[in-house]
Amino acid sequence: MTARKIIIDTDPGQDDAVAILLALASPEDVEVLGITAVAGNVPLDLTAKNARIVCELAGKVDVPVFAGCDRPLGRDLVTAEHVHGKTGLDGPDLPDPTMPLQDQNGVDFIIDTLRDNDPGTVTLCPLGPLTNIATAFQKAPDIVERVQEIVLMGGAYFEVGNITPAAEFNIYVDPQAADIVFKSGAPIVVMPLDVTHKALVTKPRNDAFRALGTAAGVAVAQMTDFFERFDKEKYGSAGAPLHDPCVTAYLIRPDLFSGRHINVEIETTSELTMGMTVADWWGVTDRPANALFIGNLDADGFFDLLTERLARL
């Protein structure tokens, strides 16, 4: 089977870093055509830097990294240093990258890549706010029908919000962009908090990362050591949820996940519930289904996959 062509759109973030590492360690399953950075967890200059740090940690310096949008479509940027630290990758002590940032804008890279490849052969993997994807769709509407699938981390239903009572961070940062993407007609798979909160890095799982003894394994353990403090305090959970690696794991082992094909709408007008993913899980409206909304995963299988692939780097 040929590897699935993907573009990773990201705002690293420790969990973004793990998602990127999993993809770069799995060339037989996914071919990373490029990585586009967006403002989110930290500002754009740091997310673009962090994406290159992660590529170098994986020893994959030939993967092109592009900077995209530095702010949401219609709102001020909200960041999450309170979770990820001032650099976005606090925890391990990683060197500054030496590989270059590409001159081309990330949005233009997305457009050109979708136009240059056969229709239905490139999957978009947004791990942060959807600003780059929405901007590309607005700038070049012809590319929407060329997208194979959008597999994204964002939103919540049963788990409600993690940045406001109603909204998950990625969608809240740019709800207008999310609204454009969910209304685009492109096939969408959503990894909401409902599933990512089941991908918990418990101590034994983190010990397994550290025991790999590799630079990548130890760095991942140090990253989760750092950002789990926030989730343990907030949720009283046994560890930190690895949100974004659920996207990559789904591309490699979709059998680990289950969900429902439902309608998802994005709240863009109410400040009380701004950025809420209104997921019609129970089918109580007649609105047409527009997304596969994932609700569960095989957590042991997920961490077995992650540990096995990280051992390759």
Image (cartoon, grey):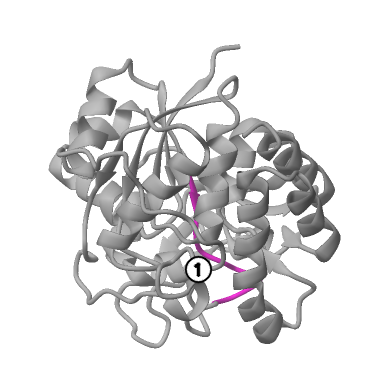
* Residue type pointed to by label 1: Asp
Is residue 70 something that shows in the picture? Answer: yes
Q: Which residue is drawn at 22% across and 65% down?
A: 71
Instruction: Describe residue 308's horizontal placement relative to residue 282 as left or right.
Output: right
Residue 158: in magenta span: yes
Q: Nearer the viewer, residue 283 or 237?
A: 237
Q: Which of 294 and 30 is in front in this view?
A: 30
Horizontal and vertical percent for residue 192? Answer: 58, 60
Q: What stretch is highlighted in magenta?
A: 151-161
Name the quadrant containing residue 36.
top left
Helix, strand or loop at disc 1? Answer: loop
Q: Which residue is drawn at 21% across and 61% down?
A: 70
How many C-alpha atoms fall within 10 Å of the one at disc 1: few (<14), some, or many (≥20)? many
212 up-or-down from 158: above or below:
above
Residue 261: in magenta span: no
Quarter of the rendering occupied by the N terminus: top right
Horizontal and vertical percent for residue 117? Answer: 30, 18
257 up-or-down from 160: above or below:
above
308 up-or-down from 272: above or below:
above
85 up-or-down from 88: above or below:
below
Is residue 183 something that shows in the picture? Answer: no
* Tag 1 residue: 90
